Structures are given as structure tokens and as C-alpha cells.
Image (tube, helix red, strand yellow):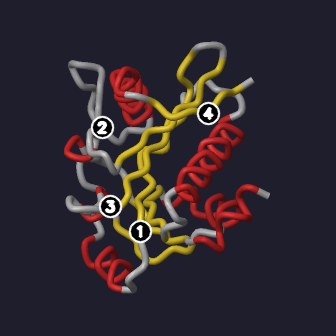
Amino acid sequence: MIEIRESGIGNIGDIWSLAHDRYFECGYIDKQFSGMFTQYPEYEFLPETKRLIAIDNGELIGTVTITLDGEYGLPIEADWPKETQIVRAVGLPIACVWRLVTKLACASTRRIVLDLLKGCVRELIECGEPVILAAFNPRHKDFYKRFCRLTEIGRHEITKGLQNAPSILTVGGPGTYARLLG
């Protein structure tokens, strides 16, 4: 049984290690001496940031991070400043979903991703159902459109801090939440 729960600071090394291993396997980063990687270290310890983890038999098999808009903005602004400002200008609360990573060896990766996203939705509902911004590799576009009703609003061939990592920016909101939980 996979358990999805909020992660405290005590798991941060394991999260960075999982992100390193998957990003290296995908060719997004070179192998790091430390065996750890975080794309947006300036957002890791803000009170607006929450990390969820997927645990199976005591092993970390997935993670996702949520950052609510606040004094320091959103991690997504590193690659999408104009688009983030446009969404922010609407005047609704916004949040960024980032670092959605699963362990390669997991047989049920899609199930883990959906469970992590459902955990995100629950967290976002508790935070007042902000509009969400999330960037993904374009090859996953159909999955996020179908299961999460996220709409593509931008595309880049490179992503800050990564290599060989094109990305699409997607947006979703309160109307998309029920679909994922249903």
C-alpha cells in the first residue's frame, strides 16, 4: 500500500537524492558528486512550500512539491516570468506544483503520479483552491491534460538548471480539482 504524506525537513536529503537519480537517468543533469539535486534551493525552506512523498514499504518512491505564491514569488517564474505575471494579474491566488518525481524501478509509476497529484489537490483545497501553474516535459502533455485537465499556455526548449529538458507550462484551477479526486 502506497502512503502519500507531507514530508518534513528530515526527508529533504532523500527527496534531493531521488530527484538527482531520476533527473540523471532522464539526461536532465550530469551526475552530481553529492548524489543530490534541487532545482530551486531558494524555495525549499519557505513556509509557502510543502513537499509530499510517496512511501511504499518504508521506501521513498515519489515526491511532489507545492509552493504558494508569496513574498518570494514562485519557482516557475525562473522560466516563465511573463506567463506567471499574466496569471497573477487576474487577482486570484496561485500556486506552483513542481518536482514531481517517481523512482524508475516502480512498476506502477502512473498510479504513484496520480496519488501524488491527488495529495496535491487535497493540499491546494485546504489552501483555498488557488490557480495552479506546473511545467512538465511535453511528452507527458496528454497525460496531464486527460487526467488533470491542465491546459498548456507556453512551451520552452530549455529549462533553468536542466539540460535536454524541454517544458510546457500548464495552468489549472478549482474546476480541475474535482476531476482528479473523482
Amino acid at the residue labelled 4? Ile
Report the disc number at residue 94: 1
On the image, the x and y values in percent for residue 61 come to 56, 26
Amino acid at the residue labelled 1? Ile
Q: Label 3 belongs to which residue? A: 76
Check contact, mark 2 vs mark 4: CB within 8 A: no
Amino acid at the residue labelled 2? Ile
Q: Secondary structure at mark 3?
A: helix
Q: Residue at x 25, y 72 (%)?
A: 81
Q: Secondary structure at mark 2?
A: loop
Check contact, mark 4 vs mark 3: CB within 8 A: no
Q: Earlier in the sequence, mark 4 or mark 1?
A: 4
Check contact, mark 2 vs mark 1: CB within 8 A: no
Q: Label 2 belongs to which residue? A: 29
Q: Label 4 belongs to which residue? A: 4
Q: Nearer the viewer, residue 32 or 179?
A: 179
Q: Earlier in the sequence, mark 2 or mark 1?
A: 2
| Residues at marks 4 and 1, CA–CA distance in whole angstroms | 23 Å
Q: Residue at x 39, y 86 (%)?
A: 90
Give the position of the C terminus as an image quadrant.
bottom right
On the image, the x and y values in percent for residue 34 come to 23, 19
| Residues at marks 2 and 3, CA–CA distance in whole angstroms | 18 Å
Mark 2 vs mark 3, foreground winner is 3
